[in-house]
Structure formats: C-alpha cells, structure tokens
C-alpha cells in the first residue's frame, strides 16, 4: 500500500524508518523521545484520535523537524491544533497505493492555499475535469485526475473497478479539488461523499471544519 511505498522511498534516501508498535500516543512518544525520531508521517485520521491524549498547553514534540500528514485533506482547524500541540513544521504528502506519490507540500503552500496537499511531483501530470471528462481551467474545482510514466492501466482481474478508476490513460483517485497553474493541488472532498441538500452541493469537509473550529476554541 501507499504507506509501504513511502517507507521504501525513505529507505532509498538513506533514512532510518521506525514503525511504532501501534497508532497510540505511547508508541509515538517512545519513537520520538527514546529513539530520537525527527520526522513523523501519519494520516489525519490517526492524528484526530491522538489529540485527546496530547497536552493542551504546550507542544509535545518541539524537537521534531517535520510532522508530515498523508492520505487526505487536512482541515485548517486540525492544522492549527497540530502546530500548537505537536510541531510547528507540518507538511503534507498526497498519493495513492495504485500509483504512488502524486504531490508533496511544505508550510508555504499549505498556508497560502488552505486545503493544499502540495505541488505535483515532477513526473506527474494532473488536472481537474467535469463530470463528462472535459478538462477545466487551472484553479477550477472538479474531479481530479492524474497520469504519469509507469502508471498502471488497470487492476488485476477486476475490469469493473478498473473502468471507474483508469480511464483513457488517466488515474482518478476519487477526489474533487483544483490544480493551480503552478502545480499546487488543493483537495476539497471525496467525489462520492458530496451531499445534495435541496439542490445545493455541500462537502462534508465544510461541516467538519465548523465542528473542529468549535473544538479548537474550547466550545462543546
């Protein structure tokens, strides 16, 4: 899967990879404090569960050089909590098990474009398209799709699933968002999770952002 591929990338770059025993706070603290880990890679879903175990009045891991989030959109309210309570330098990593890394982001692009997961990798071409598969202008919201040298063209022995994800040389990860002219990728939602409310399309992330804002401000 994508986590394994990311670990292999780190090993090839000369880094030492530490795999905690579980996704709990104790394992993370042991890896950082006892083993001297200076970079952490984690999914936003796991981070959300860890927040309840972190001190609210200080950064738990001020010595970390990078806290990298991978796998999905990071809400601004969660990002604020991470910087307050884990590490100042929060980065992003976006990709898929089928094709590997698609984009990589640092603090600059994350702050400039809320919802951004970074810039397209040099070997990746990406764009947003409408429901009919027509490419949209840079910066316009739509279904995201990507292509690159060496990308697979189908799943093994699963033509039905392949037809939904691999279309005309493009890989569709199932995300909606936009890609700016400079290659910055901004996620908005999963294409199959958009809610139709009286004809108005509402993204679940918008609701989640409001909920997290209340939590950050200390409201119930």
Image: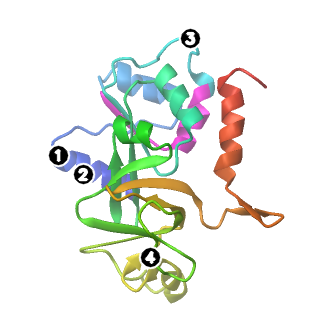
Residue 165 x/y as whole percent = 48, 77
Secondary structure category for the residue under label 2? helix
Neighbor class of circle 1 (other Cα within 10 Å; few <14, some 14-19, many 20+) is few
Q: CA gap, disc 2 to disc 1? A: 6 Å
Q: CA distance from mark 4 to mark 2?
A: 31 Å
**What residue does disc 3 label?**
57
Mark 3 or mark 4, whichever is nearer to me: 4
Left or right of residue 200: residue 151: left
Residue numbers of the magenta segment: 38-51
Query: Dot 2: few (<14), some (14–19), or many (≥20) neighbours within 10 Å?
Result: few
Instruction: Please name which of the two marks, 4 or 2, marks the residue nearer to the observer.
Output: 4
The residue that appears at 45% across and 48% down in the rendered structure is 116
Give the residue at x 41% y 24%: 87
**Between disc 4 and disc 1, whose residue precedes?**
1
Closer to the chain start, of discs 3 and 2, is: 2
Height in image: 134 above or below 207?
Answer: below
Residue bearing mark 2? 9
Which mark is drawn over residue 13?
Answer: 1
- What residue do we see at 49% from left, 88% from top? 159
Closer to us: 21 or 54 = 54
Quarter holding the C terminus?
A: top right
Query: What is the C-alpha distance between the residues marked 3 and 1?
Result: 36 Å
Above or below 212: residue 132: below
Q: Quadrant of residue 166?
A: bottom left
* Extreme residue in the top direction: 57
Reading the image, the residue beneath label 4 is: 135
The reply to whether callout 4 and callout 2 are in contact (CB within 8 Å) is: no
Are dots 2 and 1 in contact, CB under 8 Å?
yes
Q: Nearer the viewer, mark 3 or mark 2?
A: 3
For label 3, the SS is loop
Count of picture labels: 4
The image quadrant where one finds the N terminus is bottom left
């Amino acid at each position: 899967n994508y986590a394994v591929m990311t670990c292999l990338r780190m090993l090839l770059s000369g880094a030492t990879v530490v795999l905690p025993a579980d996704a709990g706070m104790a394992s993370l603290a042991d890896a950082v404090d006892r083993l001297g880990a200076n970079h952490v890679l984690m999914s936003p879903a796991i981070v959300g569960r860890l927040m309840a175990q972190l001190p609210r009045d200080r950064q738990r891991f001020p010595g970390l050089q990078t806290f990298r989030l991978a796998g999905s959109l990071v809400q601004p309210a969660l990002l604020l909590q991470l910087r307050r309570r884990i590490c100042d330098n929060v980065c992003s990593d976006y990709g898929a098990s089928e094709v590997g890394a698609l984009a990589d982001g640092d603090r600059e692009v994350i702050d400039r474009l809320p919802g951004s997961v970074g810039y397209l990798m040099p070997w990746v071409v990406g764009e947003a398209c409408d429901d009919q598969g027509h490419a949209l202008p840079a910066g316009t919201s739509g279904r995201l799709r990507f292509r690159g040298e060496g990308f697979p063209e189908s799943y093994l022995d699963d033509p039905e699933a392949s037809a939904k994800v691999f279309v005309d040389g493009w890989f569709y990860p199932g995300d909606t968002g936009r890609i700016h002219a400079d290659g910055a990728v901004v996620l908005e939602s999963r294409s199959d999770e958009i809610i139709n409310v009286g004809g108005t399309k509402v993204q679940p992330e918008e609701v989640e952002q409001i909920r997290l804002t209340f939590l950050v401000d200390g409201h119930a």
